[in-house]
Amino acid sequence: MNPRSGRFAPMVVPLAAEIAAARAVAALSRLVGAGGGTTVPGKLLSTLDPGAVDRLAARLPAGTATISATNGKTTTAAMAAEILRPRFRLAHNGSGANLLSGVASTLLAAGDAQLGLLEVDEAALPEVMRRVRPRAVCLGNLFRDQLDRYGELELVAERWRDAVAELPVSTTLVVNGDDPLVGDLANAHGPALVFGLDDPRVARPALQHAADSKYCLRCGLPLEYEAAYVGHLGDYRCPNGHIARPPLDVVARNVELRALEGVAFDLDLAGETRRVELALPGLYNVYNAVGAAALAHALGATTDEIVAGLGRFSAAFGRFERIAVGDKTILLLLIKNPAGANEAIRTLVDGGPPRLAVVALNDAIADGRDVSWIWDVDFEPLLAGFDRVVATGDRAAELALRFKYGGLAEDAIEVEPSLERALDRGLELTSDDGELVVLPTYTAMLGLQRIVAARGLVRPYWERAA
Amino acid sequence: MNIRVAHLYPDYLNIYADRGNIAVLVARAAWRGHELDVTEVGIGGRIVPGAHDLYYLGGGQDREQLLVAADLATKAEPLKAAAAGGAAFLAVCGGYQLLGRGYRGHHGDDMPGVGLLPLETVAGDRRMIGNVLLECELEPGVRRTLAGFENHAGRTRLDPGAEPLGRVVSGFGNDGESGYEGCRVGRAIGTYLHGPLLPRNPWLADWILAQALAHRTGGEPPELAPLDDELEALAHAVSSARAQRR
């Protein structure tokens, strides 16, 4: 007797029928206004038949690539998509639904796509990799982020290490060599394509407070940095010689930071050096661009395609966005953990520190229930320039305390938990033709997007991502 | 007056925004005309009993905690002498565990402790994570609440008769069972609460400053001038509501 038959045998539904059912749910979810409908069908599918994800991925003729990192995975994936679009029809989860359910939804909607390009949550990565069996894996960085959800950094790294060790040698591993934890993963797999940054002129004078992986993985001694670029990303070595930054295959050099206007750099790739002009600001976006370039190279893109794609790229959803409101503009910069927030602040301050900002802190699961991370962010360079700040979101009062104990006068701090009223207050305080800086956490960013979309100022993300 | 603070292993034990606690102590001392001299004591650094009025230890990831535990154990005698001499202590999370007699891990990752607090910690299987609310009575008849966030796998058990920092109103506390959180011996306090702890619980920041001042002057803990704590009270209210809704 077939062991799978009998009373408890799972109902076997043809994949096509599952897909039809799940797509109907997506349409329904949009109709009833339950949001973008971006993960509901995937949730249904992964409940009906978790193995369906494996089979859906296997249908993509050019295979699948996954991208993960604490910071920059959405942007890196969107950059890679921009580069690869002329070459492949893509199944890409551009709206940031990056758990297994989001991956399932993207694969469901894949249609005649050739290549899966999947941004994946750090914690979900091992299972997603086991299911979709990627032909290329791009690993960007690991920073402390939502310790209440992910657990400690080492734990995430360990799970990544185990998952990477299981990858077949045919899978191309693309790693950021500047991150000591991530760079070390190359050793768990064998040959890897290593990317990084090489320009001591744009290094930080010292390791930031938010640097995490600053000790040797073997002996625990503090790593010595030739140059530290973003958090603990840089050119490091253990004084005992245990570990050191691996040789870089894909490198950014001669970086020219143009404050909020963008950044340019020389891209060294496959024996060629080409100037890349990026419309996104900040050193962290150089890392995203080099990571995307390395991944695209591994997937067969030419250097011309890479340079052109990066040049065309504007910004991933909500990460860095300008929204016109009459004569005024809103400049939206996502902040979600210390390392990322520090880079957003550094970029803002480089462009002339704003005198006013709306900062939004929520503590939903996607933001992290634990809000203590705001004390690890170096807000001080911003505070020095503020005449006024509006603290908003569900944990607005915590932000207000962060600013108060960071040295900002109490009468310069306004607390307005309602996002909508805070945004209006910020716009009211903004001069005509002026720009209002808004720094939200993830769900606060979604809330603000809904507010401006309801006013007809931007299109909802599920339309734009299509 | 200057209050002398020893901040132990700030490079290693800093995971839950411990510098927020220090910033609150610095500011609230300054607003009363006192200066906080913070000295960082790292691996190999010396502890001289009597030289500091307050010792601060933060929390670290397991790996960082393991790196400092052996060094901290070599400082056990001078630290205990400092406590016996009336210095104040605030230890949070990992620092709290290490001020006990030690940490027993799952697989050979045992850590020695200082033995300043009458407690032991054993690794647990499930992390205890979430908002937490305590009720404390550090002085007889004066009940106040502490709102914070906990995230720990260790189960901390106090010795019989040891004084906890507070009663758990909502949350896990020391071990998820006893109904108590933290430990207090005289002017030394250990707790799992971060968030960080002091910004939204300013009464505890002031209590610690008063204890440190008592050590500094050799007298009684002084009454500190009241401050405008409106924002602090608001943050406390939101945080305790979170804990009670969990």
Image: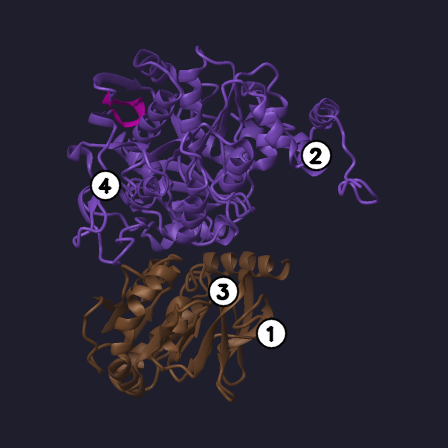
Chain colours: A purple, B brown
Residue at mark 3: B153
- Residue A236, given in percent of the width and then of the height, sits at 21, 44
Q: Amino acid at mark 1?
A: Glu
The magenta stretch is: A258-268
Say if B106 sits above or below A57 in the image. Answer: below
Task: Label 4, secondary structure: give it.
Answer: loop
**Marks 1 & 3 on one chain:** yes
Residue at mark 4: A245
Q: Chain of mark 2?
A: A
Q: Amino acid at mark 4?
A: Arg
- Residue A378, given in percent of the width and then of the height, sits at 31, 47
Q: CA distance from mark 2 to mark 1?
A: 38 Å
Placement of the C terminus of chain A among the 4 image quadrants: top right
Residue at mark 2: A44
Task: Label 3, secondary structure: give it.
Answer: strand
Q: Chain of mark 1?
A: B
Q: Amino acid at mark 3?
A: Ala
Q: Is residue A48 visible?
A: yes
Residue drawn at point x = 80 percent, y = 40 percent: A5
Q: Residue farthest to the right? A: A7
Q: How many marks?
A: 4
- Residue A222, given in percent of the width and then of the height, sits at 22, 55
Residue at mark 1: B177
The image quarter in which residue A339 lies: top left
Mark 4 and mark 2 lie on one chain; the one further toward the N terminus is 2
Placement of the N terminus of chain A among the 4 image quadrants: top right
Q: Chain of mark 4?
A: A
**Marks 4 & 2 on one chain:** yes
Task: Label 1, secondary structure: give it.
Answer: loop
Q: Any magenta on residue B31?
A: no
**Mark 3–mark 2 CB contact (< 8 Å):** no
Residue drawn at point x = 35 percent, y = 55 percent: A405
